[in-house]
Amino acid sequence: MSKKLDKETMLKMYHKMVEIRFFELTASELFKKGQIKGSIHPYIGQEAVGVGACFALNSGDYITTTHRPHGHNLAKGANMSRIFAEILGKVTGYNRGRGGSMHVAALEAGTLIASAVVGGNIPIAVGAALTSKMKKTSQVTLCFFGEGATNTGNFHESLNLAAIWHLPVVFMCENNIYAVSTPIYYSTLIENISIRAKGYGIPGITVDGNDVVAVYETTSEGVDRARRGNGPTLIEAKTYRWEGHYVGEPRVYRTREEEEKWKKRDPIQRFEKKLLEMQILDEGRIQQIKEEIGKKVTEALQWALNSPLPSAEDATRFIYTDED
Amino acid sequence: MHRITYREAINEALREELLRDENVFLMGEDIGKHGGAFAVTKGLWEEFGSNRIKDTPISENTIVGCGVGAAITGMRPVIEIMFIDFITLALDQIVNHAAKIRYLSGGQQKVPLVIRTQQGGGGEKGTAAQHSQCLEAWFVHVPGLKVVLPSTPCDAKGLLKASIRDDNPVIYIEHKNCYPLQGEVPQNDYIVPLGRADIKRKGKDVTVIANGLLLHSTLKVAEELKREGIEVEVIDPLTFSPLDKKTITDSVKKTGRAVIVHEACKTGGIGGEIGMIILEEAFDYLDAPIQRVGALDAPISFSLPEEMRILPDEKRIKVAIRKVLE
């Protein structure tokens, strides 16, 4: 059975959400200053989903993630410095600088892959769950994807296959409404993605993705079901990304009013309020925590900035196992 | 040694590897009790059960993706794609995932996945454009994949065992009209290593590089030309990626003449790549321009006269050899 949410765990979840928020704000600033090449896709506003879900997993469980992987990796226990390093293309990054922001995969924390092909990580999660079942390890795989991915063939085929084989996988749909610029109410007729689960004969549930406790409890149910051998669950966590799809994206497809409305439902503020009410935290302690984390983020970034880049000589290494 | 068919040789390889390594398992459509669309996996489900011989729904991309996920978490899946024409559905998982994961992870992950499929047209099994293509060139073009095409029973068994033991993703392409061909196959545990071409017939006058059913056509032509005093050296590349350039170029340096034969259509076929390699590495040794024999650039027709016109045959191989000897 999943762990009941005790005070200590709730504090850890709070820490983690703040860490993710500060990390993403810092990374975004770095990008705006021109210090990161390519593109980054910030998780700002969605922290409750990643944290609520990953805290329902054991350290030995797996996750697969997407082009927006920083929050998931951090929630699962990855090291900030090495994520910064990866974003900067440094050799000390989790992927040796090979992937950059969209492919950060902290294997040591259980992140198997961050795929930038929408839905591409879903069949892979099914495969990892298959291994757990075949080897009888009782590991569970949690698969993150957005609402846009639920229209891909990957989603359809994967949920079906996981269902018929009763695989230990939890499918976590982060419905942040927009797939780049395309809202879910354009691309899909149904209101709740979770009802698609019925089409595969598996349980589906919609949860407030900005309520970290609700996400934790719902995910725990799915994880327990999977670990007991009773197959997959589809969870839809409704949330919102504060930034554009990528940093700097003009967001012409939504209003600033809508954004403000969602910012008032800030998952971190909501959790703070709850922790204050439960007297697990006070304002002073909150300030302290934020200062500590701010410092940690700064140090992590500095470590990454000081890290070396890989050598150009290594450009064709690590393609085949026998040619390294 | 025993004399068995290409199909039986592949079945033996699968069986022996399933016995040898508990991480090996099969996934594919109709491979279980049905024994596979071409009867290649016949008997395996009875012996190993549903846990290791897994029938799947029609979901090529996810079958392969599931294989990728299993491979990166410690299993060694062997996936069957019924016809190479359907591999198009799985290209995202093959090209964007299987082939890239090791590189993207900075060498921390490996993908020991084998995708078995079959290709080719013509003959009794000729069933037109969506069931007859030869697509090996696509996969040769993707760094991170290995591409293997066996033409004989002995090679089929040894190469498949080697592919299953290889820690990289391997596209193992059988030829549907090779399935009934018989040949001597060792009964002990042996492998045919990847990355090494095989000189199927030695000769001094011309190097012909051929594979699949056309390897056998080429050997037949070589035997006929011997009576005219022409000695053809026939090379079967076996592995197309990584290609054994040395065996091929050493041969051309000896004979001075090269013909490349493949059933895939000529334009964009592997013949262009091999021809260019010969030009780059053995140009000074060439006594004639390189000849290529490939299918006409057309989908494969169902109707017999059209199908036969499109596909290369012994006649066209002979014409090409004569041309290079002019």
Image (spheres, coloured by chain):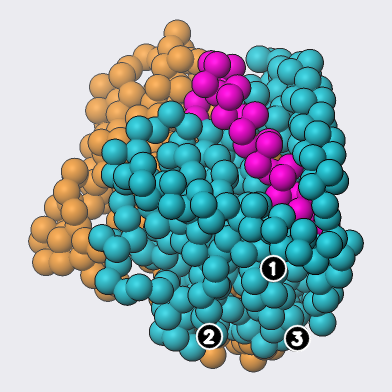
Q: Which chain is cyan?
A: A
Element at label 2: loop
Q: Nearer the viewer, residue B58 or A176?
A: A176
> Residue visible at 39% across and 26% down?
B275
Secondary structure beneath dot 3 equals: loop
The residue type indicated by label 2 comes to Ile
Question: Which residue bears the numbered disc 1?
Answer: A213
Which label was assigned to residue A228?
A: 3
Q: Residue at x 42, y 65 (%)?
A: A150
Q: Magenta stretch: residue B57 in it?
A: no
Which numbered mark, 2 or 1, is in the foreground of this view? 1
Q: Nearer the viewer, residue A163 or A109?
A: A109
**In the foreground, B303 or A55:** A55
Q: Is residue A90 left or right of residue A150?
A: right
- Circle 3 residues within 10 Å: few <14, some 14–19, many ≥20: few
Residue bounds of the magenta highlight: A11-39
Q: Residue at x 26, y 22 (%)?
A: B326
For residue A202, which numbered disc appears in the image? 2
User: Which chain does the numbered disc 1 sit on?
Assistant: A
Amino acid type shown at disc 1:
Val
Q: Position of residue B223 (x, y in %)?
A: 41, 47
Q: Estimate how packed mark 1 is, as few (under 14), some (14 to 19) or many (20 or more) residues with alpha carbons within 10 Å.
A: many
Location of the N terminus of chain B by quadrant is bottom right
